[in-house]
Image (tube, coloured by chain):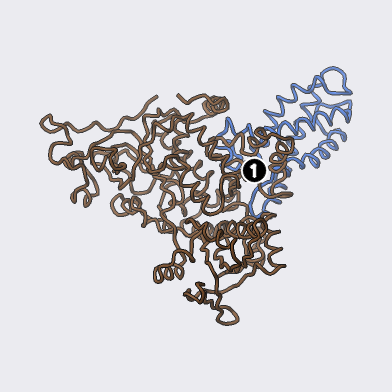
Chain colours: A blue, B brown
Amino acid sequence: MTPTLFGRIQTRVFLVAVVGSLWTLLITPVLPGVDGVPYAMTFSILLVVGLAGVVWEFLYHALQQFRWEKDWPTLLSLITGVNEGVLAWFIVAAGFAPGIDDGVPLSAFLVHFITTWLVIFLYANGPMRVPFLRWRYRGGRLV
Amino acid sequence: MSQQQPPPPPAPPGGAPAASSTSAAGDLTDQLIATSIWTDEMVAGAGIPVVDVPLVSVGGGIGSFVLADFLRIAGMPAGSMRALGQADRPWDTYAYLASVSQIPEPERLRSDAGSTPDNIWGFPSFAVREAFGARSLTGFIAPLFQVLVEPILTDYYTPPAGHVYAGMQREADRIGWWDMVDKGQVRMIRRRAGGGYFTILTPPTGTSATKRVAYRSHHVHTAVGYPGVRFLRDLQEYREKHQDFTRVVNAYEPHEHVYQELRKRPGTVVVRGSGIVGSRILQRLIDDREQHGAQTTIIHLFRNFVDGPQGKSIFMRRPGADGFAYQGFNFPKAAWGGQLKNRLERSDPEERKELIAQMGGTNTPKRKLWQQQLAKGRREGYYRTQVGTVTEVYPGDDGTVVTRIDTADGILEIAANYIVDATGLQADIGEHRVLNDLLEHGGAGRNAVGRLDVEPSFEIRGTRSGEGRIYASGSSTLGGYYAGVDSFLGLQYAALQIADDLASQRFVKKIGPIRSTLQWWKWAFNRKVS
């Protein structure tokens, strides 16, 4: 992808809010190590990932400036899941995620985060172009 | 849909057929040639039959095809557009140039996975399609792995030329392209009094009752490709003076005899040009050494030798080494749709010219195979580089051609069996008959780099006729708001801009998210566009 900063933020918000939410709705009932269907917990984690992600985008965009092609290679958008996942876990474990009082089992966090990351990654690298024909020419801007 | 209709045909004088009123010749008259804006009566008076169609696309190549694809998907009936050109299939000219410059169908182009002239969305990309078309597990994984890790761990994925042509064949069948084409050579486009345009076609001999046919349309699109191949001045002088078209060849003309001869006996080749075309020629010469036992010595001439990364700012520094400037595609990727595209759009004409020169110019991808081949050639002494300015090329002894070079160490003379001009230079747009006519009669102008001056919508500035507009896409528009015009993705971007501009005039529907998704399903299941 060849994102602009504004495009990065718009795409991030869309992907987390729409694709991430849909996936969270589906995956939450089958998460391991939790009682019931903890939507409050998973959507809280998603919110953390989304908000922290917007901040991460500023760093990524700064790094992109050192690339001649001014692109963001596919591999980077996959492996940045590692740093983002680690940070999100610390935020959640430290009790900064809203609406989570009892703590989050690591197994549930990992399954939720990793699958959501992969679904978003796969969607952004192909099917996203189907409804949004102009998206790839606009540096990721949707509006 | 609300489809604009072409202007009504003129009432035949006295009820007689227009073509028979004054002249049955059906050819251009001196009056028509000299007049910039034609009336219906003038055309009828020359006996030229008129075909009414809302949109004409001049070229009939990939540029015309990609626009047709977008407009058909945007709801345009097939009968509302005519593509005029000489090729049987839209990719024929491209495939010819690719083939002679050493990219036959199994070889890979310099185009990324998402540049899909057969699919307006870029999904599924050529890499995904190659994976799902593979017959082995390795064949399935390799292209997917490559697009995942490009360009960090591997070279950029690029599709085999044959896959691209096969995709266009399928899409051409799907959109009804073959019924949208009229063959022949376009002579000129002239504005029509009252709005719209006349496009004059010379059909193949024997296929038409008259020498010319006039297409009367609301809008015109031009996508004529390269105006022609241009030689380096010294090589052109040599060829003209000595009438030697065998030993001094251009990479964009058939020159297979060079390789065949060099397989038979050892020889020396001078290669000029360090862009993508030069890289392909070097690969072919070295492939022939490695696979067919050729004993060729290659002297690679550089006028500007790139010995390291170029650019003063660490934020705008292009990799380079060994004489070559390296980048994946002919411009940095973000020129097609990221921050460099935005920057170009915001620039004034002179800044655009500078930025285009900085981002483009002569460059080639840093492919592992080529790096290995050239490194081996340097080690073993059969690939040598020379830096300097060529002052003269003249015949030498034993049928050789001598290149005299002014180098930092003085004058040097290199005798070679062949010289390959792989600079990939293009002729001036004024050398293309139709474009030249647009410049002289159509109101078109040149941009800062001397090509057609177009709006962000790819409308050619100054050519409007009533409500009618002339659009252009492809290499003739380089120097405008978009750098990568001479590429598959650039043709797709231009087509999208033109389709949106036509949608704003209610010529077609705007392709919004719903239409886009529904039409994509049709594409996926290869359902015909209605």
> Which quadrant, please, contains the C terminus of chain B?
top left
Looking at the rendering, which quadrant does residue B265 occupy? bottom right
Q: Residue furthest left?
A: B14
Q: Residue at x 60, y 57 (%)?
A: B284
Q: Residue at x 58, y 63 (%)?
A: B262
Pinpoint the chain carrying mark 1: A
Residue B267 vs residue B491: left or right? right
Residue B521 x %, y %: 56, 25
Looking at the rendering, which quadrant does residue B149 occupy? top right
Residue B474 vs residue B17: left or right? right
Looking at the rendered structure, the kind of residue marked 1 is: Met
> Which quadrant, please, contains the N terminus of chain B?
top left
Residue B202 x %, y %: 29, 44
**Which sits in the foreground, B281 or B221?**
B281
Q: Residue at x 24, y 43 (%)?
A: B211
Q: Mark 1 Cα within 10 Å, few/some/many (few <14, many 20+)?
A: many
Looking at the rendering, which quadrant does residue A68 occupy? bottom right
Q: Residue at x 71, y 51 (%)?
A: A63
| Circle 1 residue | A1
Residue B372 vs residue B518: left or right? right
Residue B240 x %, y %: 39, 68
**Which sits in the foreground, B259 or A17?**
B259
The vertical placement of B380 against B103, above or below, is below
**Which sits in the foreground, B483 or A13?**
B483
Residue A117 x %, y %: 75, 34
